[in-house]
Image (cartoon, rainbow, N blue to C red):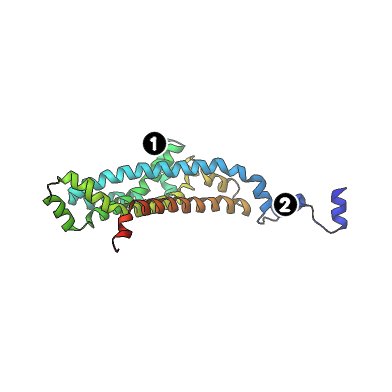
Amino acid sequence: MIPSVLAQLDIQDPAEGDASCVAENGFCPGWIADNFDRYLGPLGEHVYLTVVSVVIGFAIALALALIAHRRRWLTGPIITGTGILYAIPSVAAFFLLQPITGLGNQTAIVALVSYTLLIIFRNITDGLRNVPAEIVDAARGQGLTDRQILRRVELPLAVPEILAGLRIAFSTTVGLATLAVFAGGGGLGSEILTDRFFRSNVVVAGGLAVLLAAAFDLVLLLVQRSVTTWQRAAPA
């Protein structure tokens, strides 16, 4: 009854409109609304892969940067090594690791961690070395040890550059994590690969990845503003 009435009034049935949109590979808001829950699981996997990879990468890069800060000659070799890891094509890295770590999150995380090291290491070392020498000398003149100067003076003043490196690392990792599907790691890339020829599916999965990167960037920007109030107060 209802379809026939709609036909007489030349009004399209919404369900038929969605079916027609899907058949024509268009952008289908109705289909997206009905199927949005299918993206929640992959989105959670994407968040997990990104956060775990960046946290591990930050811990490793921070340790390397602190060592290189005291032994400057190690900076070049560390940058070279992390640069080689960064230069490996991501898909190739996922496949090369599979014989060692197998399919799954472990392989994806190992590869993603390797791509964060160069970015975070360089920002930490630059931040530490951009601390004015006169401030370090003044702290030393007050009797602070090298460890105390690092903890109370150099690291706090290096926070803006450290957080800038983390923002880049998060954005990069969110993008690379879409390829983690090739390592069996899931994420939003699994949705894209499952139905990569359907425009609405690709737009939703890709759009969620972009929004996730923007969300991480916004959170870190707010953190940076909250912990570096001294930067805004300095001109006053």
Residue drawn at x 64%, y 49% is 32
Q: What x and y, as percent, mark residue 14?
A: 76, 52
Q: Which of marks 2 and 1 is nearer the N terminus?
A: 2
Q: Which amino acid does label 1 sit on?
A: Ile
Residue 87 visible in the snapshot: no
Q: Is mark 1 on a helix, strand or loop?
A: helix
Task: Give the residue at the far front of this rendering.
Answer: 236
- The part of the image, by quadrant, that contains residue 191 is top right
Q: Residues within 10 Å of mark 1 (few under 14, many from 20)?
A: few
Residue nearest the viewer, comparing 9 with 18: 9
Give the label, 2 or 1, closer to the camera. Answer: 2
Residue drawn at x 75%, y 53% is 17
Q: What residue type is labelled 2?
A: Asp
Residue 124 appears left or right of 107: left
Task: Give the residue at the far bottom of this rendering.
Answer: 235
Residue 198 appears left or right of 46: right
Q: What element carries label 2?
A: helix
Say which quadrant the C terminus sits in. Answer: bottom left
Residue 66 appears left or right of 37: left
Residue nearest the viewer, comparing 232 with 197: 232
Q: Residues within 10 Å of mark 2 (few under 14, many from 20)?
A: some
Q: Compute the Cα span from label 2 to label 1.
A: 46 Å
Q: What x and y, as percent, mark residue 203?
A: 58, 54
Q: What x and y, as percent, mark residue 38?
A: 60, 42
Q: Name the residue under label 1.
A: 100
Q: Name the residue under label 2.
A: 18
Residue drawn at x 27%, y 50% is 156
Residue 230 visible in the snapshot: yes
Q: What x and y, as percent, mark residue 221?
A: 40, 54
Residue drawn at x 18%, y 44% is 147
